[in-house]
Image (spheres, grey):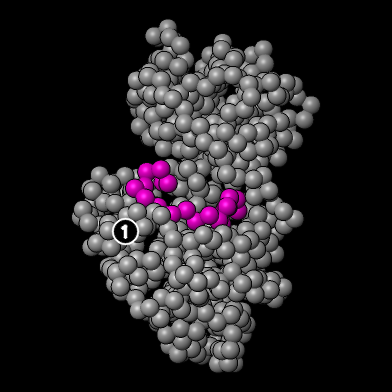
Amino acid sequence: MCGIVAYIGPRQAYPVILKGLKRLEYRGYDSAGVALLNHGLKVYKKKGKVADLEESLIGKDLEAHAGIGHTRWATHGEPSDRNAHPHSSASGKLAMIHNGIIENYTQLKTELTKKGYQFKSDTDTEVLLNFIEDIQKNNNCELEEALRIALKRVVGAYVLVLLDQDNPDTIIAARKGSPLVIGIGKGEHFLASDASPIIEYTKDVVYVNDFELAIIKADELVLKNLGNEKITPFVQKLDLELTAIEKGGYDFFMLKEIFEQPDTIFDCLRGRLDVNNRTITMAGVQNNIEQLKNANRIIIIACGTSWHAGLLAEYVFEELCRVPVEVEYASEFRYRNPVIHAGDVIIAISQSGETADTIVAIERAKEQGAFIFGVVNVVGSSIARISNAGAYTHAGPEIGVASTKAFTAQLVVLIMIALKLAKEKKSIDDDRYVYLLNELHNIPEKVKEVLLLDDDIKKLADKYKNAKDALYLGRGYNFPIALEGALKLKEISYIHAEGYPAAEMKHGPIALVDDSLPVVFVATKDSYHQKIVSNIQEIKARKGKVIAVISAGDDMIPKMADDIMMVPEADEIVAPLLSVIPLQLLACYIGIAKGYDVDKPRNLAKSVTVE
Ligand code: M6R
């Protein structure tokens, strides 16, 4: 949540920062701002999107070779000009941007208020900035030293980036719990929440670790720990192309990402699944095979869409590997007192690798001796780094706030892990194993077929766009897909939607059914098909509108449903990779038909780095 960008070097800082903020807008878009150093500190900020800030700055003097910028997802204080970052210190000499939450800010604020400080905003950031300045004043020390002292008192998560009017050739940054990447150019440095603002300038980057401070000049990068000891920066090469973060002719990133799925699933399988040799190669699994094979239990932790992938993985692992699996919301897991044994394996799933609840849940499980296996999309992210082992999903940058291609890539990785483990444990017979390898191998081509439903789904979106509520029902492997379909609809079209196991509807939700309620059935052919057909009849008997995702060749459901979306036949374990796609498209086109920016749904942010 919140995107930060900074630049120091020979270029004009403002255009670099502005472009970077536009790329990071998926992290928050409540307000935006920049601070520029040029014969003094100039701070400009504005409620709304980065484009609103840009417009408000036309004609202003934006000349500077050092600057910081921020796009905000509000935590403390409503979205407004005055709560926008950067914040200025009481003296006006310091400016700071922040991504994270300072949990003990009320205590710090009380101390500062007693000393006579007054605050222009409602933010925790302004409090921390003045706390730092107060330390600097009282100790008559450099900003770097004051920051170090301040951070020893801070409880919470942060990336902080500071500009100091008295030291115009230096930017200072610190990290704990939120992401920070430094790009190293020739005589210039870039800082950002992720690599997207950096890649067109340099591919050499350093990922700053927790409790590290970066003191950055145009031609020098010094990393230190909070004990003031120097750390050698670990420079890595970025494996990311500019085209991957552009819209490529689509109106929305979300649409582009839905349509990329044949390729992203293929990329995820590539080099891993070999149908000819009947193997799955995954170093993270292979190198830890004893640990995984001997797990008494697997606990999956994740949030949101990644949690839905985890729920499907529960069904797959239990079926194929005969190991007990529990799926937990990371936000619950971290605060309760879960029983974890040394033989437990935790699978942590996250697109961003930066979700605060998942990170803390991992830390709690690690403290109790669990082995952590990360399934992560963003290379080098926090979860990738704190896991004992893992597998990347290789879906490429996902910019639309609603997760689509990352979800299908997560499913592919999880199914491959389950198959590999089942083979090692001999809990799957050879025929079924080979059959499922082939079924997975065929998925990218089948996804292409599903995407041909595009125009039909647009029409459906138009038909149902004014619905007030919707019910999504599925059984077995399609139950998590019903949950995911409902989540997609709520988050980008703001239509209230509930996902339920189809058989559970009789225990309550059926009371909602009338002739105005669309009920979306995820009803591809599987072991429960006959049962779900009965559920459809129950809804029709109460005049509900039935929209069904069905398998090719199904001649029963089309006779009952009001609308159908037909996907190719596939084994029930891999069919969710197909059945979710019409639901992604339906939600996306309803959002677009209602005139919403589906890439930036209200109140949301792509990466939830606050608890
Ligand atoms: O980056 P993560 O996978 O850890 O994110 C988890 C959720 O915040 C995320 O899936 C969220 O629910 C999406 N907006 C869903 O589309």
Q: Is residue 281 above or below residue 154?
A: below
Q: Is residue 590 above or below residue 213?
A: below
Q: Is residue 398 magenta?
A: yes
Foreground pick, 531 / 138: 531
Give percent across and percent down for residue 250. Answer: 72, 57
Q: Is residue 199 above or below residue 141?
A: below
Residue lying farthest to the top in this orientation = 140
Foreground pick, 471 / 273: 273
Foreground pick, 348 / 238: 238
Q: Which residue is painted at 42% across and 33% down in the image?
A: 209
Residue lying farthest to the right in this orientation = 59
Give percent across and percent down for residue 71. Answer: 59, 37
Q: Which residue is painted at 49% across and 65% down in the image?
A: 273
Would residue 334 be seen by someone viewing this image from the given angle?
A: yes
Q: Which corner quadrant holds the C terminus?
A: top left
Is residue 189 shown left or right of residue 211?
right
Q: Quadrant of residue 66?
A: top right
Give percent across and percent down for residue 15. Answer: 71, 31
Q: Which residue is painted at 66% across and 60% down in the image?
A: 255
In this picture, which residue range is highlighted in magenta? 383-404
Foreground pick, 308 / 341: 341
What amino acid is found at the position of numbered circle 1 in the picture?
Ile
Magenta stretch, overall SS: loop
Residue with the mark numbered 1: 289
Q: Is residue 431 magenta?
A: no
Q: Is residue 56 above or below residue 380?
A: above
Would residue 261 be seen by someone viewing this image from the given angle?
A: no
Q: Which residue is painted at 68% across and 55% down in the image?
A: 252
Is residue 101 shown left or right of residue 408?
left
Q: Residues within 10 Å of mark 1 (few under 14, many from 20)?
A: some
